[in-house]
Amino acid sequence: MEKLYWDQVEYQNQKIYFTCTRKGISFVNNPNTGISNIYNFYPKLDAEFVFNRRQTEEYKIQLREYIDGTRKYFEVPVNLSTCELNEQIYQKINDIDYGNTMDIKEFCDTYDFKEVDVRNAIVTNPLILIIPTHRILNVDYSEGYRKLADFNNLLLDLERIK
């Protein structure tokens, strides 16, 4: 059984839970939804959840710095379990500079991805904030586990302010 270390950061009275393994951060949850949402992303997950500040400290610091506007990029190891296509899409999304956005159609045309693949990668992104899918605009989240329109707008506003 895998150990998942968990913790939370707060922003404007919203709790954002995250998990990490010894290999890196593995999940960042929607605000105020609790850690159990991880099973929507990893339905076969067999893990022991452990609260351990020593294991989560650096991740929490960097998430807090990002939310406070003092960090623009993350420098933490990532433990991402996804397909190769999603990894390619996430790499290109990471190339979008802090404070900038791209329409999903423009993103697909620029990087030669199918819109359905990009949308799927975005709505199944287990690492919101770390992989800044909020920078892709006009994404339909209606069939995903994340109903993020309000949170995405908050993140975009945060990036514009700083």
Image: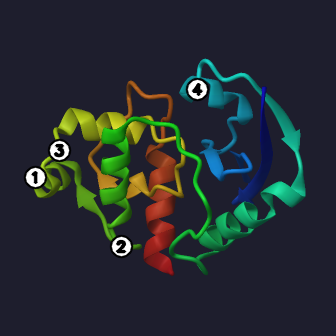
> Label 3, label 1: how many angstroms apart (C-alpha)?
7 Å
Q: Are marks 3 and 1 in contact (CB under 8 Å)?
A: no
Q: Which mark is residue 48?
A: none
Q: How crowded is mark 4: few (under 14 residues within 10 Å), some or many (20 or more)?
A: few
Q: Residue furthest top?
A: 44
Amino acid found under the numbered disc labelled 2: Asp
As measured in the structure, the alpha-carbon distance from the residue carrying label 2 to the one carrying label 4 is: 29 Å
Residue in the foreground of this view, choosing between 157 and 97 = 97
Front of the two marks 2 and 4: 4
- Which structural element holds mark 2? loop
Nearer-the-camera pick, 36 or 50: 50
Q: Residue 42 carries which label?
A: 4
Residue bearing mark 3: 113
From this viewpoint, is residue 140 visible? no
Q: Residue type at mark 1?
A: Asp
Q: Residue 8 at x, y = what percent?
A: 77, 51
Q: Which of marks 1 and 2 is nearer the N terminus?
A: 2
**Where is mark 2, residue-wise?**
97
Question: Which residue matches tag 1?
Answer: 109
Instruction: Kindly check if marks 3 and 4 are in contact, taking CB atoms under 8 A apart as contact.
Output: no
Q: Residue 96, how many percent across, how many down?
A: 32, 67
CB contact under 8 Å: marks 4 and 1? no
